Image (tube, rainbow, N blue to C red):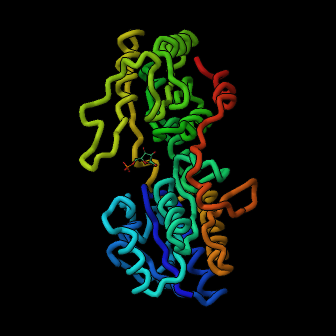
Amino acid sequence: MRVGVLTGGGDCPGLNAVIRGVVRKGVQEYGHDFVGFRDGWRGPLENDTVRLDIPAVRGILPRGGTILGSSRTNPLKVSDGIRRIKDNLAKQEIQALIAIGGEDTLGVAARLSDEYGMPCVGVPKTIDNDLSATDYTFGFDTAVNIATEAIDRLHTTAESHMRVLVVEVMGRHAGWIALHSGLAGGANVILIPEQRFDVDQVCEWVTSRFRSAYAPIVVVAEGAMPKDGEMVLKDDSRDSFGHVRLSGVGEWLAKQIEKRTGKEARTTVLGHVQRGGTPSAFDRWLATRFGLHAVDCVHEGDFGRMVALRGTDIVRVPLTEATARLKTVDPRLYQEAGVFFG
Ligand code: F6P
């Protein structure tokens, strides 16, 4: 069988581990051939391919990013996109396609499979961990480790200067990175997109922390918003590609804290550092297993499926389920963390 592989959406540590797992098992155990498509759905749209054999995947397990490149190209929004993809897959004699991506990439795979009969298998990825069909996505653990290390480091400088340190982490719609790194790093306030925050309450927690002679660390997810809606997004809140940019909440909050508490505050925006570099051992393990199971689906002709983690098992779910519901932070988990606030 000749199998196409692509990685779409924002990159994420562990993508290369998936690709390696797919190719190693697919070639060695099943004797399949692989073709890499460059830059997500742009590859099959423009027939842009890259060699994908055993030598091509040698040494990539610990490498961040993706050897295939990535983009947010959506063929459903490109005129004649579906026909072009069908033609190019036929030209390449592709009999199955493994799409590794988040909500958008897998949403396209689900429609191609469901509505156009293309044999697709999906592998979920996102550092945000917000796909409901799987317990965890790879990339999340690495991002949490990076954010936790940053918080550890910020504690010491905050203490030296007795300042408030606001740390803005990724998470536009879900606060998983904020919650996990905030708990692991001993933050005094954690703010997530799922629950609007009250600036006065944040200032109270900050002040009470100073009263016990410690400097507070506030972890805020980039998508968190204040209750009163007084936060004004920066003028550049939409980038030149039209993506909404909500970054700015960390800076805004630090200014509010300074104004209302009289304490000096600084902001650190972790940004894409959370997505770069080598994957953690957990993410390599999960990504590799996803790759091995995705190629099993292909081999068995079980298309329209996505691999997912349930407990310690890798299961298969309909691709359409992959994007059905965003997995947001359970209010009970957020409440549980609240014991450390202030
Ligand atoms: O979806 C993952 C994610 O890392 C979000 O947490 C973040 O808001 C976004 O991607 C950033 O996207 P970009 O790389 O396009 O700036």
Residue 265, quarter of picture: top left
The answer to whether residue 16 shows anywhere in this view is no
Q: Position of residue 202 (x, y in %)?
A: 50, 16
Task: Name the residue nearer the viewer: 46 or 185.
Answer: 46
* Above-or-below relation of 51 to 74: below
Task: Name the residue nearer the viewer: 27 or 269.
Answer: 27
The answer to whether residue 147 shows anywhere in this view is yes
Task: Name the residue nearer the viewer: 332 or 267.
Answer: 332
Q: Residue at x 38, y 79 (%)?
A: 49
Residue that sits furthest to the front in the current view: 115
Q: Position of residue 321 (x, y in %)?
A: 62, 54
**Quarter the C terminus occupies:** top right
* Above-or-below relation of 146 to 84: above
Instruction: Answer left or right for 78 relative to 27.
Output: left
Instruction: Answer left or right for 135 relative to 111.
Output: right
Q: Residue at x 58, y 12 (%)?
A: 212
Q: Position of residue 246 (x, y in %)?
A: 37, 35
Q: How many marks?
A: 0
Q: Position of residue 268 (x, y in %)?
A: 39, 34
Task: Name the residue nearer the viewer: 166 or 227.
Answer: 227
* Above-or-below relation of 300 to 327: below
Instruction: Answer left or right for 28 relative to 67.
Output: right
Q: Residue at x 34, y 39 (%)?
A: 245
* Above-or-below relation of 215 to 128: above
**Quarter the N terminus occupies:** bottom right
